[in-house]
Amino acid sequence: MNLSDAIEKKAVLLELKAGTKDELLKALIGAVGRSSRVKDPAAAREAILEREELSSTGMGYGVAMPHARVKSVTFPVLGFARLAGGVDYGSVDSEPVRLVFLLLTPATNPELNVQLLGKISRICQREDNRRRLLGVEKTGDFLTFIREMDAANGMVG
Amino acid sequence: MPSRRVRDFMVTDVITCRRGDKLREVAALFATSTISGVPVVNREGKLYGVITKLNLLGYILPEYLELFADIDFIQDFSTLQSYNMDALEADLLLAEDVMNMEPLKVSPETTLLKCAALLTKYRPDILCVVDDSGKLLGVITATDIARAFFGKYAGSGGTPPR
């Protein structure tokens, strides 16, 4: 599955202002929860926070990937936030986070969870990709970038 | 002849993991033992899910292989690329992220014949044995059941394994 298929356009938040991890997650979960593909926003929120409790999804490089598998989700939903300022996320490298991909996938399809997280992870491991994400000005630019990544399997920055 | 039941053949000394365990650590279990599945439990032993060796091996493969009905035409698998393991390499994945959240469960009183039926129909790698509260008591596999039914041909008299 392509990442662009999962993106919820209304949950692409550029220059999100959040001072803490809690504020950030509240804003992004709220945006994703309004997607028509999320039938039970409360359950999705609980699943994301519960997963975050098990272990921080701050992967390093200023990137976080909060994610959860949710019973009421039948098709993946991907939201994105770029923070105006870095937020302490408890990441593996202790660096503040500015780029956040939030992913919800069906509980019955762990393979999809692994695939999509793998794609996002691969994209964000490249500095040139992170730079582009930090520089996108409009939602359309972000969507274009993701489509390019889908086409190139994350190999092209 | 009374039906043979799970309680007499299940394995009770089970390797388990927690939801928050890193997937790398779970994967290491498969590399260092012959187990085919690892139940995921909480501190009280309540079963949450199962991770199987075949599931993990599936993640090594590129997703587009699912589209092919026949993979025999692929001459060289080494050219295939999968990015699924990137999330594993980034230490992003936990047992929670990949476990089967609805594993097949049986009780200690389930007959071995029913277990055999479940295994042949649904092909899980293991059956988790739970009590009424959902607490994991053990596991039983095709190997355990085969020993029960076919052990007599090996001269063992079909005695419970292990």
Image (tube, rainbow, N blue to C red):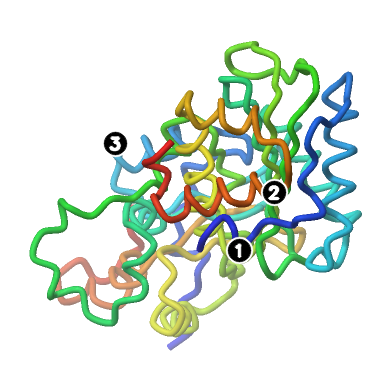
Q: Nearer the viewer, residue B31 or A109?
A: A109
What is the C-alpha distance between the residues marked 2 and 3? Answer: 29 Å
Callout 1–callout 3 Cβ contact below 8 Å: no
Quarter of the figure with residue B110: bottom right
What is the C-alpha distance between the residues marked 2 and 1? Answer: 17 Å
At mark 2, the secondary structure is strand
Tell me what residue is drawn at x 89 percent, y 58 percent: A34
Q: Residue furthest top?
A: A94
Asked if labels 2 and 1 share a chain, the reply is yes
What is the C-alpha distance between the residues marked 1 and 3? Answer: 38 Å
Chain of residue at mark 3: B
Q: Is residue B94 visible?
A: yes
Where is residue B112 shown, x and y percent of the image? 45, 77
* Dot label at residue A68: 2
B49 on left or right of B143: right
At mark 3, the secondary structure is helix
Tell me what residue is drawn at x 62 percent, y 27 percent: A63
Q: Nearer the viewer, residue B120 or B2?
A: B120
Give the mark nearest the N terminus, 2 or 1.
1
- Badge 2 amino acid: Ala
Where is residue B25 shown, x and y percent of the image? 44, 32
Tell me if residue B5 comes above or below residue A104 in the rendering. below
Chain of residue at mark 1: A
Location of the N terminus of chain B (image quadrant): bottom left
Where is residue B113 shown, x and y percent of the image? 44, 84
Tell me what residue is drawn at x 89 percent, y 37 percent: A26
Tell me what residue is drawn at x 56 percent, y 33 percent: B21
B76 on left or right of A123: left
Q: Which residue matches tag 1?
A: A5
Tell me the crowding category of disc 2: few under 14, some 14 to 19, or many 20 or more residues within 10 angstroms, Cα based: many
Q: Which residue matches tag 3?
A: B32
